[in-house]
Image (tube, helix red, strand yellow):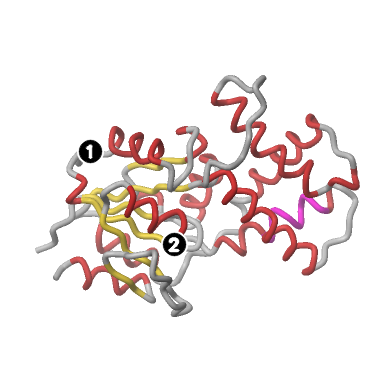
Amino acid sequence: MSKYETLIFDLDDTLIDNNQSIKYAFTIMIHELGLEYSDDLFSRWKTFDTSYWHTWESGKMVIPDFIKTLEDKITYLRANRFILFFQKLEINFSEAVSLNDLYCSMLGVNVVEVPGASQLLQDLYHDYEVVIATNGPLDAARKKLEKAQLDSFISEVISSEEVGFSKPMPEFFHFLYQTVENQDKNKMLLVGDSLTTDILGGMNNGIDTCWLNPNEQLLPKEYQPTMTINQLLQLKKKISK
């Protein structure tokens, strides 16, 4: 019998192949700007975007004093990355907001599930509270789940967009605790592919973690997931022990 009651899944690159989603969205955005798509440009965007959000997640990004509300903070964070990445185009803030809206709306169009995601959730959702915890946009997350036909297995979708803070920040997890039905952290398991957001977030906030490591990467000593899997369908056996 499993010790867990609540299974908290990261979304991108845990249940959904995020590379397919962002490549499609980026291609549409590039065409909107009148630019030509290239794999090199896309690779640079992915590297930049990952670094940008890691800076935010680590608490090192400075938000201007005039940004007061949660909605304004999210708008600023998402728009500012386009201003920085496309510096040579001298995009203004209003244009960057429109670009972000287009980009986010396209994230839920070309959706491919990580192998085993649908089967795993079908096997688990009757016996567990299944929750999504994502640092991605809320609307895009819901569209991805719906497009992949995974939404009927999910109890809650918790996004950094509505919280105002991202994994691994403690504020994100405080919000999560107040949202899920089960209030006992000892009966929660966080499943994700990211060591810096999912595994570190669980470690720092008292939740067991499962690292999805499909490429069998070496585990740095500073991270200590409760368990590791290489394929999603291995999880069911792991948690039933």
Residue 50 vs 131, above or below: the answer is below
Q: Which residues are magenta?
A: 23-30
For residue 24: magenta?
yes
Q: Is residue 188 left or right of residue 108?
A: left
For residue 72: magenta?
no
Front-lying residue, 47 or 241: 47
* Residue found 45% across the figure and 54% down from its top: 197
**Quadrant in the picture for the C terminus:** bottom left
Q: Is residue 56 left or right of residue 214?
A: right
Q: Which secondary structure is most common in the magenta stretch? A: helix
C-alpha span from label 1 to label 2:
26 Å
Q: Secondary structure at mark 2?
A: helix
**Label 1 vs 2, first from the N-terminus:** 1
Residue 185 vs 96, above or below: the answer is below
Q: Is residue 183 left or right of residue 173?
A: left
Q: Position of residue 103 (x, y in %)?
A: 69, 46
Q: Which residue is mark 1?
A: 181
Q: Which residue is mark 2?
A: 195
